[in-house]
Image (tube, rainbow, N blue to C red):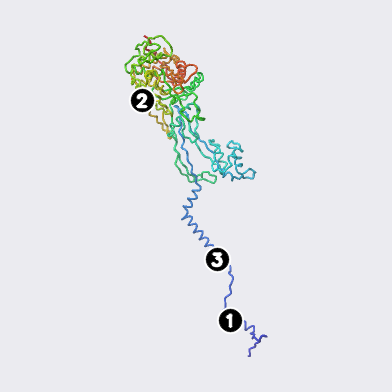
Amino acid sequence: MARTAARTPAGRRVVGEATRLLQVPTQRGPRPVREAGPRGRVTALVVVLVLVLATFAGRLVWVQGIAGPAIAKVALEKRLSSVTVLGQRGQITDAAGVPLATSVERYDISVNQRTIAKYRSTGGTGAPDGAAGVAARLAPVLGANPAELGGELAGSSTFRYVAKGVLPEVARSVQALRIDGVMVEKVADRVYPKGTLAGNIVGFVNADGKGLQGLEATLNSRLTGTAGSETYERGAGGQAIPGGYSTGSPAKAGDSARLTILSDLQWKAQAAADAQKAATGADTIEIVVEDATTGALLALADSGSIDPNKPGAAAGGALSRAVSDVFEPGSTGKVITMSGLLESGLATPTSQFTVPYQYTAPNGQSFTDSHPHPTEQWTTTGILAESSNSGTVMVGQQLSKDQRYDFMRRFGLGSPTGIELPGESAGILHPANQWDGRTQYTVLFGQGVAVTAIQATNVYATIANKGVRPQPHLIDGWTSADGTYTPVTTAAPQRAVSEQTAQTVLTMLESVVDDGTGAAASIPGYRVAGKTGTAQDMQSNGITASFIGVVPADAPRLVVGVFVHNPKTDIYGGTIAAPVFSDVAGFALSELGVAPSGTKASLFPTTW
């Protein structure tokens, strides 16, 4: 059968439809691209996800396993705050443990002015931003004027105090505001609960809490606590995170000093000094009350004592004139001459002398008594009781110059007592070979030599203590931070004269009060031994009137010295100082519960 074919108009053969459909290509060309189906897309997504998870897993391994500790350390460090923990300063108390100086918890408020400037008010209240906004919130808590406080908050300083020494409740209120740039710092504020009481003894500290005057200065190293430190993990508001990281070293409080001072007696002595200063127009007055056997000072009063809470301009010089100011002891110094004569066997209490108003020494120097009188027949006791300068030179010149100097040194003249206060003077006692023709005699009746009130009082404590010179002191003991109390150990006492000499002189001194210039020092029911004095004040070129006495004379318990500088109403110790002695000593005996004297004095004769 013939195949049918047809040609196109161009002459090309056309194969039938059936034939064309059955044809198979004899050559392979490029395969057409097909679109990915749903299965392909899922596969790709899985691959990508696996890669991402693998990346995260690797990063997690890196963070958690390899770099984790270092990263955690950096993060922790950013959350840590380190503060210094103050070691509390020890207290200063009186003999009964009542605080005279103590530290209390206070806080200082400071600001970062740059941070304050970025403050923005919240809550849509329309409150101002920046310093004005902070002042509006902070001023009511601090009790400040908002406008004035706003002026202090504005600026570019990174640290400025806006309040110091605020109470703990105020500090807590400031912290509760949680204002960025407002900082609260705990400090220790030194306060003096008794004010002027013993202010001349206690002293005060400076703005940094360091002792600047008085016992605060001399005892500073032992009173000062040891600072500690604390590092803690803080939250966003700066608060410590409960259970968070915390470490540090504890602070240690300083030791506390217990004084020998009796507060009530100190008050009485200060009041008496101030009252007599006003009554006599004196420049200053000092009163010393010393335990007759231990040397402990039970009161040490200066007229016009400062308030350590408000010391003013008292930063320079010693606060207590009783340890720093020197004056001629005058007739109170005659007790040393009498002790030397008795100790050396050159006289007895009943040795007889004919004493004129004016006496001329072998070298031509003349000396007179304070009041004109006819020639008297006095014993050694009478010379002391009547406070005769002429008679003292007559009997005292039996001592060589070296002996005179030696006995003054034995009684502590020319050397500091070692009292714990700053600025103590050693007084003035020139060597015997430097005395001129007049001074070699005037030292016998307390002129040409200078003492402090502490030194002068301690001379009589030596007589009262059976001839042994005690160590004057203000510190009774120390209490450590753990509550352990340790009494102080004072310097070993030094014997000046024999017990017999001391007892004889003490009896002679009773005649001064019983039948001499010190009658105004008597105390009903008690035997009193003492001596009046009137001499030149070497610092003011004025007069110091004094009385130093021992009570009870039959069983010495107290030695009280009263020193009145430049009185305007009178100049004699018997009328200016002796009555103050009677007042203060009588109060002290009552406070201490000292029984009245059980015996009457058996005195030496004063005339012959």
Across and down, in percent, residue 40 comes to 56, 68
Q: Amino acid at mark 3?
A: Ala
Which element carries disc 3, helix, strand or loop?
helix
Residue occupied by mark 1:
25
Relative to 108, does residue 345 appear above or below in the rendering? above
Quadrant in the rendering for residue 359: top left
Q: Amino acid at mark 2?
A: Pro
Q: Quadrant of the N terminus?
A: bottom right
Dot 1 crowding, Cα within 10 Å, few <14, some 14–19, many 20+? few
Going from the N terminus, do you reach mark 3 or mark 2 first?
Answer: 3
Cα separation, mark 1 vs mark 2, equals 139 Å
For disc 3, the marked residue is 44
Does residue 124 appear in the picture of this structure?
A: yes
In-image side of 391 versus 150 (left or right)? left
| Mark 1 secondary-structure assignment | loop
**Residue 497, above or below 100:** above
Residue placed furthest toward the right: 9
Mark 3 crowd level (few <14, some 14–19, many ≥20, 10 Å Cα)? few
Disc 1 residue type? Pro
- Tell me if mark 2 has few (under 14), some (14-19) or many (20+) residues whose alpha carbon lies within 10 angstroms of its own: few
The residue indicated by pointer 2 is: 493
Q: Can you give x and y, in whole percent of width and height, for residue 416 in the image?
A: 39, 26
Residue 432 location (% of width, % of height): 35, 22
Q: Is residue 264 above or below residue 182?
A: above
| Number of numbered callouts drawn | 3
Describe the element under mark 2 as helix, strand or loop. Answer: loop
Along the viewing direction, whichever of 485 and 199 lies nearer the viewer: 199
Earlier-in-chain disc, 1 versus 2: 1
Does the CB distance between marks 1 and 3 fall below 8 Å? no
Q: Is residue 551 visible?
A: no
**Residue 556: image location, x then y, percent:** 39, 19
Q: Nearer the viewer, residue 263 or 372?
A: 372
